[in-house]
Amino acid sequence: MILDYHIHPNFSIDAQGTIEEYAAQAVKLGMAEICFTPHFEIDSVRKEKDDKINFYGKIVPMRSEWIDYYFKEIEQARKKLPDLQIRSGIEVGYDPAIETEIKLFIKQFPFDFILGAIHCINHIAITDHKELDEFKTNYLEKGHTQVAKEYFEILNLAIKTGLFHSIAHFDVYKKYGLEIFGEKIIAASEPFLDSTLDLTAKQNIGLEINTSGLRRNPKEIYPAPLILLKAKQAGVKIFTIGSDAHRIKDLGSGLKQGFALAQKLGLDIYRFEQGRPIALK
Ligand SMILES: [Zn+2]
Ligand SMILES: [Zn+2]
């Protein structure tokens, strides 16, 4: 059973393709289930950059009426394509400064699945090419170890909140970190891995197998296979999988490799219904 649990419909300003278009494509690809995960980013320091939703051509703030239409569109797509399971999720960009606001928001809506993500350290995007120069200016001197240290500090806080069902692209700090620091950025995670994975297991939170890295640098799945293996050894039981598609053409891309890797490492893939994890048979 192929399923994709990380999809950005065009409510996200960096994405193209409507919910119905993605759903039709999923049927075409023979998928059984998909879960949409539009971005939710409300860091007030980054208000000008992030707090934007494309609401049918109009830019509105993250906390506004679009969300009702998001659920409405999912409902309509479910009616139109009854053989496809369509889940409503969200990808929340975490920062400790906005924890209370995140909690208030996600408790208000009946999300099936909440993906937690660290997209910024010290309010600078580490996953966006547009901010590569700023990332570089701020961290080249501080060094690769500092990048990993700050990334894992925020990640640990995110895991501790218990607000998220799964952690998106666990080692994404290396995405542009590789460009700035080269290969040494990979080993920079080593001092932090064990404690973060232990915490993930203790909190019974999932880890995402994110195949977007296959489409560009680092040309591998997030997180690296060794981290997935360590996660299993640490006792992490829940693994989710997603393409992180921002375009229709990327829906499901790399998932075959993702499922093959999960099988090779003996990881169980889960889906979510109203926040309840269910292992794939
Ligand atoms: Zn993300
Ligand atoms: Zn995403």
Image (spheres, grey):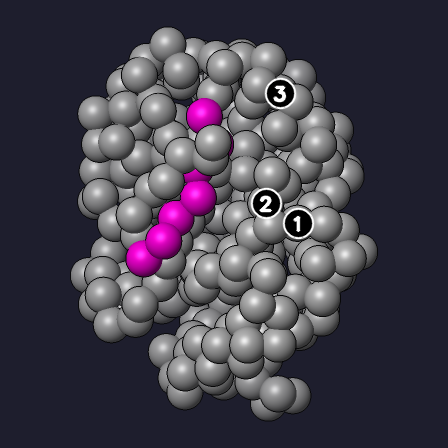
Does 252 lie within the magenta span? no
Category of crowding for the residue at label 1, using alpha-carbon neighbours closer than 10 angstroms: few (below 14), some (14–19), many (at least 20)? some
User: Which is nearer the eye, 21 or 143?
Assistant: 21
Can residue 118 be seen from the camera position used here? Answer: no
Choose mark 3 or mark 1, whichever is in front: 1
Q: Amino acid at mark 1?
A: Met
Category of crowding for the residue at label 2, using alpha-carbon neighbours closer than 10 angstroms: few (below 14), some (14–19), many (at least 20)? many
Q: Position of residue 221 (x, y in %)?
A: 64, 29
- Which mark is on residue 3? 2
Q: Position of residue 125 (x, y in %)?
A: 53, 50
Assign a secondary structure to mark 2.
strand
Q: Amino acid at mark 3?
A: Leu
In terms of sequence position, does the residue under pointer 3 or pointer 1 come before the other? 1
Cα distance in 3D space between marks 2 and 1: 6 Å
Question: Which quadrant of the rendered structure holds the N terminus?
Answer: top right
Q: Which residues, given as a range, are shown in magenta?
A: 268-274
Q: Amino acid at mark 2?
A: Leu
- Say left or right for 231 vs 261: left
